[in-house]
Amino acid sequence: MNQTRKYLPEWVNQGIITQDQEKQILAWMEAKQGKMPGLIFWISLLAGLLVGLGVLLIIAHNWDELPHAMRLSLALLPALAGTALMLFAALKRNQNLIWMELGSLSQMIGLGASISLISQVYHIAGSMESFLFSWLLVYTPTQIILSGRVSLLLYTILANWFVTSSGFSHSPDAHPMHVFWMLGCIAVSARNLYLKGNAMVFLRVYSWFLPPLFAWGMGTLGFQAKNVELLFLVYTGLVLLTLILGEWLKYFQERFNFNGLRFWGRMGLFVIFSMFSYRFFWDHIIHDELFRKSDFISDKLLWIGLGFIAIGAFIFIRKKFKDAFADIQPDVAAIIIYIVAFFVLGKFAPLAGMILTNLMMMLLGIYYLQKGVKTQSLLWLNYGLLWLFLLLIYRFSDVNQGYLARGLFFIGLGILLFFINIFVVGKKGKEQKNVG
């Protein structure tokens, strides 16, 4: 590439290319150099990790024989070396993605190593939660500024590890409310990568990875919660936020038309409404268990769930994003109605809550079925049919029927699904033929 750059002025003088074309070629070459060669990056990353691991093992072998001052110096060395590499990458190589990735990742690993070594030097007692909290807190500014891809993935895993440890642990160091500033760092880093425009493949993969990871982490919080029933509210808020962010990505970037956030958000909505379409959840889980306790107002799960809902609602009601959320307005409306029903009908009329949930499932199915037929979209058509068929299956399962009746029922659903799709495909084909 450097050879090509050397010959460009000569090509301009000989009339092979114009000066405008020379500028375009130079701009393309600079952009090409800024892109991350996948193989070189991963080899560099692996080499750096192996060297760092080797150094740590050599230090560990001679650790007991070293004086206290030397131990402290060596404990600070990983953090200082990582920070130095990060500053060099940020100040001198900020156009080179390999250096930026290695700089952010080296500081992250260095900080974690130094924190653990210093606690060993001074025999500082602590838990895994306090270690992860300190590590993530110290590294958060760097992640926001540099927004490295690999470091973001590692940051997400560690944040989920912290939430999971907080859920399983009853130690005083477990503070699951810290998940909000961790999610804030993740959101800002993902936004920075999105604005750079050269990390779309990573973000598409990341959108499939993030929701199930944090869904697991949120679930573990029930192990130390006073009112585990509030996990349903937490998941409702998480589903709302996931749906809104998925639609936001799709609206501003066509390549995100089918992203993980949209998929997991709608799957989460299916799961929540499916469970609460049964009377058991309204009668026993919400009415009998939750609202007979007087301390659920002070439960952290309540405020985590309301926090997710507030963040999602804030993004949804902003006018400049109004057109982005046209496809999920029925889903968001159904979630808001469900949240109100959760607190009102769950306490005073659980049967009405169950009926309302079934009614919303039917209306969502009819809406998306009609939308699929109108727009001739098989995706929306089958999305609506999925709502309706699930509702029919759930209510049919409430009736004690023999195998013959159940077999005929599912055969009928299969035939209906097939012919509805054939009808829409045929209608679409006729209209295209008439236009042609």
Image: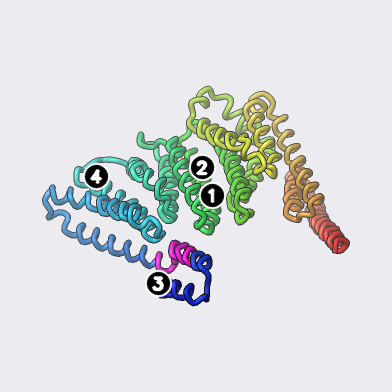
Dot 2 or dot 3, earlier in sequence? 3
Regarding residue 23, the answer to whether it shows in the image is yes
Q: Residues within 10 Å of mark 3 (few under 14, many from 20)?
A: few
Eye-nearest disc, 2 or 3: 3
Q: Please name the residue that numbered disc 4 is placed on.
A: 119
Q: How crowded is mark 2: few (under 14 residues within 10 Å), some or many (20 or more)?
A: some
**Residue 94 figure quarter:** bottom left
Question: Which numbered circle lies on residue 2?
Answer: 3
The quadrant in which the C terminus is found is: bottom right
Amino acid type for the residue under numbered disc 3: Asn
Eye-nearest disc, 2 or 1: 1
- Marks 1/3: CA–CA distance: 45 Å
Considering depth in this image, is 11 or 80 the residue closer to the camera? Answer: 11
Amino acid type for the residue under numbered disc 2: Gly
- Marks 2/1: CA–CA distance: 10 Å
Residue at position x 61%, y 44% in the image: 243
Q: Residues within 10 Å of mark 1 (few under 14, many from 20)?
A: some
Tell me if 79 is positioned left or right of 403 in this view. left
Amino acid type for the residue under numbered disc 1: Pro
Label pair 2/3, CB-CB below 8 angstroms: no
Tell me if 116 is positioned left or right of 145 in this view. left
Residue at position x 13%, y 54% in the image: 66
* Magenta region, residue range: 25-42
**Chosen colour scheme:** rainbow
Dot 2 or dot 4, earlier in sequence? 4
Q: Please name the residue that numbered disc 2 is placed on.
A: 219
